[in-house]
Image (cartoon, rainbow, N blue to C red):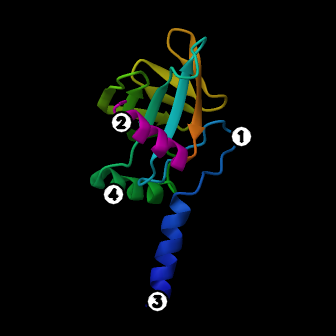
Amino acid sequence: MRHWGLMMAMALLAACAPPVADEQLAIPLNPLCSTCDDFLRCEAVGAGGDDFLLLHLRQKTFWAQVATIWDYLAQAFREREQDRRPLATYASGSVPEMVSDTNIAVIDLRQHRIAIPGGWIDQRNGDWHHDGLRGHCRLLPRPEGRALLQQLRTPAR
């Protein structure tokens, strides 16, 4: 019985490991990790270092997690083409405001694109597009992303 628990723990940890991609991606996201929080910092072309957008690809809901398990099992019969993640968007500034907490990011697993409201991000090079090149995004390590999120949520004194 103890071995069963160890095997389940290893399976859960493996689900949150970075995916093995056919090609090297600047923004690798694991579409099978339903409990992962991922953070993208996007800066517009010509913007200063303090002006940025933080995209928080949040954990899936309970039922979406169940569906992800089904998707994982169904991959034996058909290849997944996309993944959906809840998305919260934060803007930097003197009074940061959550732009939206109800959006969905759609990850195209074939073209390696992340569709977000008002544009898309190329996972191959991090380019952020909206009617042309708008800027560049990079995947933050989770501890750095959580710290930046906390910083944006805390009002300046």
Report the amino acid beneath label 4.
Answer: Val
Find numbered disc 4 in the image and state the secondary structure of the residue it sits on: helix
Q: Which residues are magenta?
A: 142-157
Disc 3 element: helix
Say if the magenta span includes residue 128. no
Q: CA distance from mark 2 to mark 3?
A: 42 Å
Residue that badge 3 annotates: 2
Side (left or right) of 153 relative to 18 = left
Q: Amino acid at mark 3?
A: Arg
- Looking at the image, the residue that sits furthest to the front is 157
The residue at 35%/30% (across/down) is 157
For the residues labelled 4 and 1, the Cα–Cα distance comes to: 29 Å
- N-terminal-most mark, 2 or 1: 1
Q: Which mark is residue 87?
A: none
Q: Which residue is mark 2?
A: 153
Residue furthest top in the image: 131
Mark 3 to mark 4: distance in Å?
Answer: 25 Å
Q: Amino acid at mark 2?
A: Arg
Residue 113 image point, x, y percent = 54, 30
Tell me: 47 left or right of 100. right
Residue at the spot x=35%, y=55% of the render?
Answer: 65
Q: Which residue is mark 1?
A: 24
In the rendered image, is residue 38 in sight?
A: no
Look at the numbered discs 2 and 1 and tell me whether their residues touch, using CB distance below 8 Å: no
